[in-house]
Image: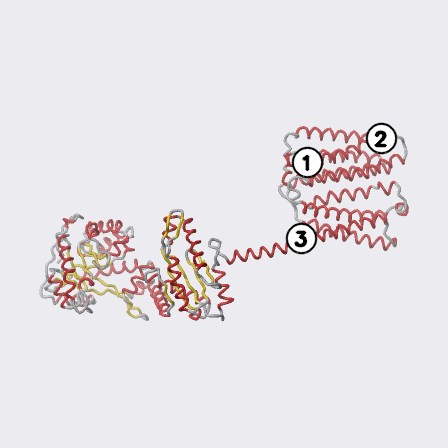
Amino acid sequence: MSLNVGLLIAAVTVVGAAIVCVAIAIRARNTVPASSRVARWIMVVGSAVAIEWIVAASIVAAIGPQGESHRHQWALAGAIGLPLAVVLMLAGIERLPGVIDSAATRLRRRLDVLLMASAIFLTGWILAVMFGNNSQQIHPHLNWNYLAGGPPVLAATLALAFGIAIVMRSGPTRRAVALLMAGVVAVALGGAAIVVGLLADRAWGIVVGGGVVGIGLIVLAWCATPHNQLLELPSASGSTAWSMSVVTISVALVMIVCEVWKTGSLDAAGAGAGVLCGFALVARQGLALVDARHMSERLRDDEVNLRQMAFTDALTGVGNRRELLRVLQSEAVGGPDCVLLSIDLDGFKNVNDLRGHDVGDTVLVEVAQRLRANLRPGDVAARMGGDEFAVLMWAKVDDASNAAHRLLATLALPYQSDVGSIFISASIGLAGCGSATDIAGLLRNADLALRFAKMKGKARCERYDKKYEEWLRRRTTVEHELREVVKRGELSLAFQPVVALPSGVPVGVEALVRWSHPTLGMVPPDEFIPIAEESGLISQVDKWVMGEACRQLARWLEAGHDLWLAVNISAREMHLVDYVAQVLDTLRMHHVPADRLVLEITERTVAEDIDEMVEQLTALRAAGVRIALDDFGAGYSSLGQLRTLPVDILKIDRSLVGDEQSVDVRAAAPLVDVVVRLGRRLGLQVIAEGVAVQAERDIVQGAGCKLGQGDLFARPMPAEHIEAMLANAPTKVPRPRRPKTVPINVERRGHSIE
């Protein structure tokens, strides 16, 4: 194949590829997004430059004047036009949306490309000089081989293409990026092949180069269509480009050393490339120093922000628990006198439940502002979580106590919100730093004082006292031992008789639980019963008491004793869905008639949830069990409750009957008389409990009360003593049977239990 024929084939191939590119562009002209049009036009111009040079060079070299000088001129034109075309293509890729984040990123990327391109060019040039067939001819003369040699063009274009490619991260657009860069490299390689063919008079090189250029142009046109999703190319970090730059620079330095060692000098082209490489390296290093300084400033700012976030409550702006612990550790340990205040808002849960959490957050912000406004400089306010706050005061305990009372008054002022005024109070526990040996102990002491402030009525301030810790330790021990008290068999029952007046004959007994612990000794019921209720352990205790009481009652009934038995029940038991069934199952298990069992409930228990209580008590009464309202008159007395509740017995609280410490017990007579008359009018039996002296018995009998209970008649005793008392009773008073059906209204209660 002649050289002219090869040039014509190359021209025809490139023209055909150009026609295909135009067709693709026309088809996609209306779907190109506006953000990428400029980038695509730059790529089109670069492709046009490559097409124009190759077509013109091929046609003119084929039909123009013959001669080596003529072909070398067009080779020189290719050496100039081909890099220009490649640079335009790469510039278009660079301007695609998402490729470059900012001007600073663009500058760094271009410096990286320049650095690698100059290093690769320098390496290729030294190789050509050292291992070329006629290195002496290349060096001193500006001949065509020097200006239009293939290796420099190839090295420069590949460096530019590679420089852009390596700074792009792989991702969802990996295939499109690879094809796009492959198109640019194909155009560069094809053009270099044509240049080499012109210089060496090789037709096959020209033909192959034209074909490769055509393929590259078609790939570029296809990749530039919108369906390839090149609009969001991910940006790359500079670490990959910088690593490649270091590698190429290292190789170039090795080549420079080799050339100087072989030839004794460095030619002008190599020196120029080295200077350019050094300039790019210095500029890139300068940018790296600027980046390092900016990064250091950002890290310092981030550290300040993170520190603020870590030690500041996000909602209120005061310190958080970490901040309080930090101050305690750094300043309070071994420092001046300090006092820790633990603050809790009373009733704040109701604010969140009724008004919403947004209103609750507004209240918390206002609480924090009031705390800051009423503290001295240096004092630390912190939000511990939820509606709990803490204040660290640098003062003596007495001064801090006065300040705490002022805070109570401040926090009790109404809080304004969009839904109106909100009224809440606060409780404060106060502990001096000298009350504990470590920070954890100080926090515990303040919380313990706060707990006692809550227990004593809220809206108050309590100082820490060692007896609080002793109480907590005792309570914790009792709660722990209660968990296995039934299994260990430490519970027992004592029975206190209920006697008929004035005869004094026992007609019933009340079962009272007792706890004898091997190390704690006798634990009073008024100590462990509230703990069992709060901890949820009361169910197992009540279940044991019910079973044991019914077992003992069955023995007495079998022995022929005509009496009933009362058992106290807790509010938690009454909330059980199957409680009624449990009671009836226990009665059937021990063969005890239901009307021989009396369940005692307190007015406080009823006041907590009267609707559910009425439902449960009604079901029990319908089964025959009788109900007694205990501690009547102790604080929650309500005539409306007596009309609503299905009860059979009123037990007058001992505070109405009298007090053995009182000088004159006759003052109780009018109250007892009123309650007894009220019971009679409502059809209820009345028991006066807590009768301790003869004067109180006289008052009770004088009011017409038929039943009494108290230490005057008998103290709580074991079952054996009750049996002895029943055996020694002079007569047995018959107990009228209860009607089978009893309505719940007032007119139904006319029966007697004596």
In this rendering, the label closer to the viewer, 1 or 2: 1
Is 664 on the left-hand or right-hand side of 52?
left
Residue at image location 63% in from the left, 34% down from the top = 33
Q: CA distance from mark 1 to mark 2?
A: 32 Å
Label 1 – label 3 distance at C-alpha: 30 Å
Q: Looking at numbered disc 3 in the image, what kind of residue is underneath it?
A: Asp
Q: Position of residue 710 (x, y in %)?
A: 18, 65
Say if 466 sits above or below 178 in the image: below
Alpha-carbon span between mark 2 and mark 3: 52 Å
The residue indicated by pointer 3 is 291
Above or below: residue 350 compared with residue 719: above
**Can residue 107 be seen in this snapshot?**
yes
Left/right of residue 9 with respect to residue 165 in the rendered view: right
The quarter of the rendered structure image containing the N terminus is top right
Q: Amino acid at mark 1?
A: Val
Instruction: Say what amino acid the circle numbered 2 marks.
Output: Val
Which residue is more in the foreground, 493 or 389?
A: 389
Does any portion of residue 557 appear in the rendered image? no
The residue lying furthest to the left in this view is 731
Q: Which residue bears the numbered disc 2?
A: 60
Q: Is residue 15 left or right of residue 493?
A: right
Quarter assignment of residue 430 = bottom left
**Element type where label 2 sits in the image:** helix
Q: Quadrant of residue 718?
A: bottom left
Place of residue 533 in the rendered image (x, y in percent of width and height, measured from the top left): 31, 59
Q: Which residue is mark 1?
A: 38
